[in-house]
Image (tube, rainbow, N blue to C red):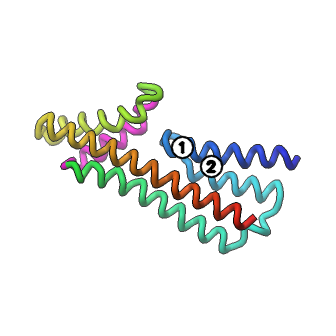
Amino acid sequence: MEIIGWILIIASFIIAFVGTFYPIIPSVVFMLLGYMVYGLFFSFAQLNWLFWIIQVLFVVLLFSADMAANAFGVKKFGGTKAGVWGSTIGLIFGPFVIPVAGILIGPFLGAVIAELIVTREGIKQAINSGIGSLIGFLTSSVVKVIVLTVMLIVFILFI
């Protein structure tokens, strides 16, 4: 039973890291699932209130950084709220429409199309917004990997 527990825990953590680049997978939920599986298979004793407070703070940081990075990337390159929304929609649907490459093409095209439809500023501005969304997504992914790694290290230290 111990081996099954560890397989489930490690699988949850791996899925959490995959979710950093495939946003339809809620990475933080799988990280927390790994903690819960550990508690159910082994013990919640090591996962005390301090552990949970630290993890909740990292979850808040993760969500905040994720939203801020995308919005910052679009805005930094001159995009508008339409570009941010288009980028987000493209990020969600891109991987389904264009498997594998859609994770990068989706946010870019979403921002470009939204900027063209809503602002009508021109193709150059729309492309800049798309580039900003792509940079924001990549920055967000790097931040997620760092935060998830720290969350995992904290978990290991507590057990």
Residue to which mark 1 is pinned: 19
Q: Quadrant of the C terminus?
A: bottom right
Q: Residue at x 42, y 35 (%)?
A: 103
Picture quadrant of residue 151: bottom right
Provide the secondary structure element on which disc 1 rests.
Answer: loop
Q: Position of residue 131 (x, y in %)?
A: 27, 41
Quarter of the figure with residue 92: top left
Residue plotted at (54% across, 47% down) = 26
Instruction: Look at label 2 and name its amino acid.
Output: Phe
Work out which residue is located at the far right of the displayed protein and give it: 1
Task: Judge by depth and name the residue closer to the eye, 107 or 155.
Answer: 155
- Residue with the mark numbered 2: 30
**In the rendered image, which quarter is residue 45 located in?**
bottom right
Mark 2 surroundings: few (<14), some (14-19) or many (≥20) residues within 10 A: many
- Above or below 16: residue 151: below
Question: Which residue corresponds to the image point at 41% horizontal and 30% vertical from the top-left?
Answer: 102
For residue 39, side relative to residue 82 (left or right): right
Numbered range of the magenta stretch: 78-95
Magenta region includes residue 80: yes
Which residue is situated farthest in the top direction here? 98
